Image (cartoon, rainbow, N blue to C red):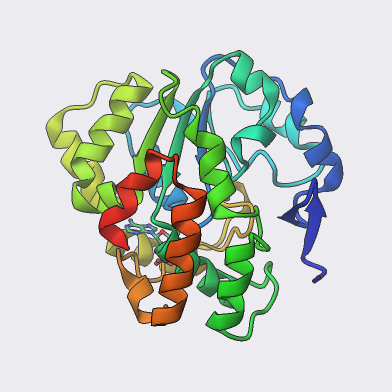
Amino acid sequence: QSSVLHKFKGILFSTMSSEELLNSLDFFNAREDDVFLVSYPKSGTHWIAEVIGNIPNAQISLTSPIELGDISKFDELKMNCKRRVIPTHLSYNMLPVNIKQKQCKIIYIIRNPKDTAVSLFHYYRDNPNLPGIETWAAFFELFLRGDVVYGSWFDHVLSWEEHKNDKNILIIFYEEMKRDLSKSIKKITTFLGINVSDSEISKIAGKTSFSEMKNNAAKENCDPNHTICALTSNRNLVFRKGAVGDWINYFTAKQRRIFDELFTEKMKHSELARHFEDYS
Ligand code: A3P
């Protein structure tokens, strides 16, 4: 085990998420108008955050992740007077209970697990806040076992599965955003109850294209107040390839078979998982 990660309730977290904070999540006071932006790492969190950040007159404030920092976190969040959009990589079970009681709006973004694994592999390699990893083969084993930061992809998605029809939860797929970004933006703005014209939607789509976001990240200084993912505030580590199906360049035939077997077993009752049949 490395010094940059620690285990909490059997799940790996960054040491930037203090044990004290993780232990106190249920003391978080949610506001009725809070919005949570939830994902397993590398599923497109920054993308959705950028979409939300570009909605004109949204009157929102994007905070850093709820699980990032120490016990002073909740005071810091309290200072925010605007409608908060709070990112997190927590599973449903670990999400502060008050968020569920108040039925705050939640956007959960999911990406096909093979591309997510490849993306997380590169994050492990490039991000100094994650352990070093030698080879794809080694990382593949860790990913399958859920021995990676935020635990198993399968368990994460399954924790949200039961809540997919809750009216306060919007599920967005990365692949659906790739296919028709404007349509996804429309879904998001409608869900948030913000009126946005079609021409404004095309503008948002332009500003949140992969190339635009990657170029902007290269130009800006990294700002800790602008942290979307609890694993880095350096946005240059985030925009790698931005593609669907890159996994094919990494998985061997055998890895694909092993992965598909586990997927079929773990996700056999999952309706969300059916969405990924086209991407395996
Ligand atoms: P890749 O590593 O496959 O390129 P997260 O924001 O949850 O950390 O997810 C990061 C992944 O989303 C990276 O995937 C990144 O390139 C991709 N991504 C970020 N912005 C994107 C955009 N505007 N369009 C497509 N993919 C994007």
Q: Quadrant of ligand 1?
A: bottom left
Tally of marks: 0
Taking the view exactly as shown, the residue that stands out farthest to the right is: 20
Q: Quadrant of residue 189?
A: top left
Q: Relative to residue 175, is residue 220 depicted above or below?
A: below
- 194 and 118: which one is in front? 118
- Where is residue 203? Give x, y as percent: 20, 43
- Residue 140 visible in rendering: yes
**Residue 32 versus residue 163 in the image, above or below:** above
Residue 99 quadrant: top right
Residue at the image position 23 percent from the left and 26 percent from the top: 196
Identified at 33% across, 46% down, the residue is: 274
Which of 53/39 is in front?
A: 39
233, above or below 65, in the image = below
Q: Quadrant of residue 213?
A: bottom left
Rendered-image quadrant of the C terminus: bottom left
| Residue displayed at 51% across by 17% down | 33
The residue at the point 13 percent across, 32 percent down is 198
